[in-house]
Image (cartoon, rainbow, N blue to C red):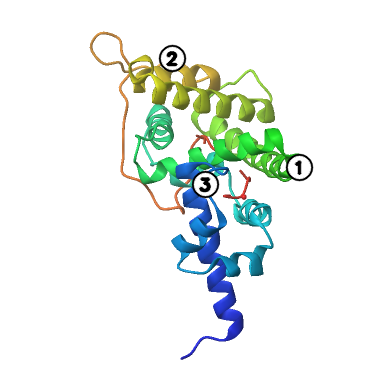
Amino acid sequence: MSQTQQQRRAETRARLVDAATALFADQGIDAVSIDAVADAAGRTSGAVYDHFGSKQGLLMALLDSWKDSLLTVLLAQVAVSDSARGQLAAVWENVATEPGDERERLPLLELELWLRAARDADVADVLRVRSAEARRYSARQLTGWSAAVGAQPVFEPEELAVLVKALLTGLAMQRRLDPDSVDDRLAVRGMAALLGLPPETHETQGGDHEIVRRPTASTNSPAPPPSNTTTEETHHEH
């Protein structure tokens, strides 16, 4: 069945946004041209102007289509574990991506958007709204998770959402620059302390905490604590 003109336009728009998302994350927003986005999408530069008017218009469309921030997306992706610290380990594993990992694009794109927002008031306004949405969502998730595992955080839910994201984003950035300075156990211990988890009853030899890793669960699984990063609903979520 042949596509209608409306369907073809929708497909072209989606291809252009997807291409821009990948290129902006990989090369930086300022380094990517309209022609590069069009080539990557298999379209002409005229299609970019037709759909978005300009590179700024394309960027705003990307923000609008990014429904979740790094943090929100990772909440849906984290592995399911039978222990609270196992869930924290799964969160960290999703945040601490290795260079070249496909998942690395999400935190990199978020950082690119933050940089642009620092210089562009229009982008900042959109990003601020998405960030607030994600923060409220994360706060609700943290409240439910804390009650389920017996955690006793000393911060209010929205404050905790801010602090958890800041901790994970900072640790992930530090690990990328200096891998030896941030290992998995340090990240999990830091999250556990911030989230107010009670002391562990089972420890590995030498007093180090056991980190449990599981395969990624479906998005229908109960969401553990937040992770991105992230990140929002900064829809990519932008």
Name the foreground residue: 102 vs 162: 102
Task: Give the number of the mark in front: 3 or 2.
Answer: 3
Q: Choose the circle earlier in sequence order: 3 or 2.
A: 3
Q: Which mark is residue 24?
A: 3
Q: How would you rate the neighbour count of disc 2 (Cα within 10 Å): few for under 14, some for 14-19, many for 20 or more? A: few
- Tell me where residue 189 appears, x and y as whole percent: 43, 18
Residue at 64% in and 54% down: 55
Separation of residues labelled 1 and 2 (CA atoms): 41 Å
Name the foreground residue: 119 vs 94: 119
Which amino acid lies under the numbered mark 1 shown in the image of this protein? Answer: Asp
Task: Give the number of the mark in front: 1 or 2.
Answer: 1
Which amino acid lies under the numbered mark 2 shown in the image of this protein? Answer: Pro
Q: How would you rate the neighbour count of disc 1 (Cα within 10 Å): few for under 14, some for 14-19, many for 20 or more? A: few
Say which residue label 2 marks.
199
Mark 2, secondary structure of its residue: loop
Q: Which mark is residue 125?
A: 1
Which amino acid lies under the numbered mark 3 shown in the image of this protein? Answer: Phe
Residue at 43% in and 30% down: 88
Mark 1, secondary structure of its residue: helix
Q: How would you rate the neighbour count of disc 3 (Cα within 10 Å): few for under 14, some for 14-19, many for 20 or more? A: many
- Residue 150 visible, this angle: no
Name the foreground residue: 228 vs 28: 28
- Tell me where residue 93 appears, x and y as whole percent: 37, 33
Residue at 31% in and 13% down: 208
Q: Which image quadrant is residue 133 in?
A: top right
Q: Choose the circle earlier in sequence order: 1 or 3.
A: 3
- Residue 69 visible, this angle: yes
Q: Is 5 located above or below residue 130 in the figure?
A: below
Mark 3, secondary structure of its residue: helix
Q: Is 60 located above or below residue 186 in the figure?
A: below
